Image (cartoon, rainbow, N blue to C red):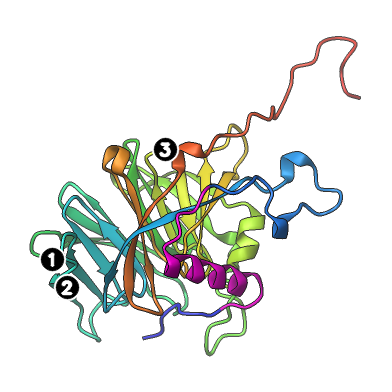
Amino acid sequence: MPTRTRIVTGLGASVAAGAVALAAGLVPAQASGPTPVNRVPEAGVSAAAAEPPVYTATLARSYDAFDANQGIAVDDKYFYVVDNRSITKHDKATGRALLQFVSNPDGPIIHLDSGVVVNGKLYAGHSNYDESPMESSIEVFDTRTMRHLDTYSFGIFRGSLTWLDRHDGAWWAGFANYDEIADGETEPYGGTYNTQVVKLDDQFRVVEAWTIPKRILDRFTPMSNSGGSWGPDGRLWLTGHDLGEAYVMRLPSGGAELEWVGTVTLPAVEGQGIAWEHSGDRSKLWAIKRSSKQALSFTVPHRSITDPKTPTWQILGPGNFQQ
């Protein structure tokens, strides 16, 4: 079964190389300045359209995880490593693998992509990637026994379901589309610009949906949004398929596009699914490193990230109307 493993060049390679060097030395990293050297706004781009500040996470701990390939979920005592057809439960204290769910090769589970633990159940995003047309479902597991409990099918929907999270009384999900052309096809796999973040009710019905800024999607292409998790700062954190970066988003005050408020470099990470561990001041962001088969936890300077205060509109009185 194909996986979404892809090595990128150019910007992605330079970011990854620097991230690996930083992680190898375990060098504590401070928040960087608001405009990195390699991200100077192009001529004619307004200050409001310039990229937001960049910060750097610090590696807290790494674990060996033989099936670290797609994503990760986490709760108070355990972390759960997600591969295409398997999810492995690990002890946080020791890193030891305890239980594993495995789907038969000819079974209905094709491409698990991420997970989130809610009230003792692990909800995993699942799709038929990279088959056409795109089909998606949510697969539910008992975290104690790792037995499969339930399924919810979207059928043919808005793309491939790559991540799911619970926040503010609702479900949130990422439906990815790709500029990649799958084997045997002649057209892109949905088109990266069609990727959406969707808010769902308790019955997984769509309440609202947003797009991701094109400047972020341009970094994702030819792949797409692979990970998403709501942070302790009340913002949505998104990752792509390849780069060691998390993009910090907030819901917009108007319009249909999420607002990009910051970028956090994740040393040694190579994209894919993420999960916030919510434990107050000790909250950590978890990710995987596919090439070395590791699960990683990070201390992230999320309190340093501030929302922009640039006004987006104004009310004009007589004599000041724009013509």
Residue 303 % position (x, y):
45, 37
Cα distance between the residues tagged 2 and 3: 32 Å
Q: Residue at x 17, y 73 (%)?
A: 101
Q: Position of residue 63 (x, y in %)?
A: 27, 69
Spot occupied by residue 156 in the image (x, y as percentages of width and height)? 42, 66
When asked about the image quadrant of residue 257, the answer is: top right
* Number of other residues with Cα within 10 Å of mark 1, as a class: few under 14, some 14 to 19, many 20 or more: many
Q: Along the polypeptide, which appears first: circle 2 or circle 3?
A: 2
> Which residue is denoted by mark 3 in the rendering?
233
Q: Nearer the viewer, residue 82 or 205?
A: 82
| Point 43% across, 60% down: residue | 227
Q: Is 264 rendered above or below residue 319?
A: below
How would you rate the neighbour count of disc 3 (Cα within 10 Å): few for under 14, some for 14-19, many for 20 or more?
few
Mark 3 or 1: the one toward you = 3
* Amino acid under disc 1: Met
Q: Eyeballing the image, is 320 above or below 249?
A: above
The relative height of residue 104 versus residue 248 in the rendered view (above or below) is below
Check contact, mark 3 vs mark 1: CB within 8 A. no
- Specify the segment rendered in magenta: 8-30
Q: In the structure shown, which secondary structural element does the residue marked by tag 3 occupy?
A: loop
Task: Give the residue pinned by disc 2.
Answer: 101
- Upstream in the sequence, badge 3 or badge 1? 1
Q: Cα distance, mark 3 to mark 1?
A: 30 Å
Q: Which residue is mark 1?
A: 146
Q: Of marks 1 and 2, which one's residue comes earlier in the chain?
A: 2
Mark 3 belongs to which amino acid?
Asp
Amino acid found under the numbered disc labelled 2: Phe
